Image: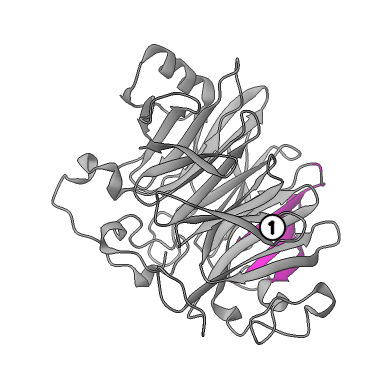
Amino acid sequence: MIGLSPLYTDVVAAKRKFFQGSTIKKYSYGSGCKKSRPSTFCTVFGSAFSPALSGRTYLVACTSNGLICVWDSVGASTEPIIRVQAATADEVLYDVQFIQSNGDTLLVVSGDPGILLYKWSAFLNAMENLSNGNIMLEPIAQFNPHPSPSDGEPIEINCTSYSAVDNALYGVAGDSFGCYQWDLESEKLVGTFGGAGKNRSNGDYLHDVMAIPNNNHLVLTAGEDGAITFWDGKERKIIETMNIQNTMNKNKQLVTWQTQNKGQWSNGSNLWVSSMDRKGDWLAAVGGSESGNNMSLRSGPNTAGFMATWHLPTRTFNSGCVTRESYNAIAYNQNLDSFVSGGNDGRLTFLDSATGECTGRSGCTSSMIYTLCCNAAPSMMVAGGTGGSLDCFIDRVKASNFTT
């Protein structure tokens, strides 16, 4: 989160969501102000479209002040139908996901409280009985990671992914344990993998996790060590690690897979991977770098980013590009057959899914983008971030704006 103006520096103080926490200073508010502060003082970190039910699709987002907000995705109102105070106003929610388990549609919300698991039917019932407003809903389960080994404080979960093969819920965190694996039925912690330490691969803060469906027990993790690691989720053992710096030469140019091990990006030690998504057998990842020499960012000095794609079955580098801006999110848009990324310049970048070439850009209301989600039918895409709002795009054109 490099280059934050003072207006937004309160949102994740002491956390490292796409930045080194020591670079952030907490913005001071008077006692009791946080619960009533306007939405311009919050950040939207996670968003997802609900499964369609009777032709209706809802948009769900989570914020830096502990709220889950729900909108009718095709409704006329820009205000949420309901707001659920899922955590205290001092706690950040980073990610929302929908999963299907044992015939139930579940909403998975993660952040400072760990992982909160809700039945989506509870939200639907609340919206049916309440025109709009702020409500409280109890989760059916809560999954808590280990306390911090350094100070005993609770550890946040940045992102989750569900494996139907193992009925396992994965959550990545910013501690030495890395990725947590819970059994969804028993609600028990099965184990951890991918954190810092001997034989643990990812040596730093983890931002993203992806369980690959219909591919045995394959799980991917990515974070601030600049690597994407492939795991056997059942055994919690490393299969392979793809280091982003090995796809770039000393001139910070992306190289082809034939030469990817012959050169390094000189900023590899400061490189981080923030987000992943895939189209079939193709994996796309984005991120950035701190102290990137000779590369500028409009919203912050001495930083740069990248977007790169790999072929999953062979785990070979395919294509990519180095960018002026750091990217925080990427999503595959089926209707455009494009990967869409957003980051610290407040714009969406559309990238050809086959070549990785930029095919266009669209401006957003938020000055920094932290979440992207796409819906196939009806065709729409949402981008959110600072300022507490989300822009809705039809194709590449901004059609409406939702406020938290």
Quadrant assignment for the N terminus:
bottom left
Q: Is residue 323 visible?
A: yes
Colour scheme of the picture: one colour
Residue at image coords 58%, 46%: 160
**Which one is nearer the viewer's eye here, 357 or 145?**
357
Residue 378 against residue 174 in the figure, above or below: above
Q: Position of residue 134 (x, y in %)?
A: 31, 27
Q: Amino acid at mark 1?
A: Ala
Q: Position of residue 314 (x, y in %)?
A: 86, 61
Q: Position of residue 123 (x, y in %)?
A: 46, 23
Write down the residue under mark 1. Answer: 284
Residue at image coords 60%, 40%: 395
Q: Dividing the picture into quarters, in which one does residue 164 lie? A: top right
**Which one is nearer the viewer's eye here, 356 or 331?**
356
Q: Position of residue 393 (x, y in %)?
A: 53, 40
Q: Dividing the picture into quarters, in which one does residue 27 lie? A: bottom left
In the figure, is residue 309 to the left or right of 403?
right
In the rendered structure, does residue 15 fall within the stretch colored magenta? no
For the stretch drawn in magenta, what is the main secondary structure?
strand
Circle 1 — which element?
Answer: strand
**Which one is nearer the viewer's eye here, 179 or 183?**
179
Q: Which residues are magenta?
A: 214-243
Residue at image coords 78%, 47%: 280
Quadrant assignment for the C terminus:
top left
In the figure, is residue 260 to the left or right of 17?
right
Residue at image coords 76%, 61%: 355
Q: Circle 1: is it few (<14), some (14-19), or many (20+) Cα within 10 Å?
A: many
Which residue lies most toward the left here? 30
Q: Is residue 143 visible?
A: no
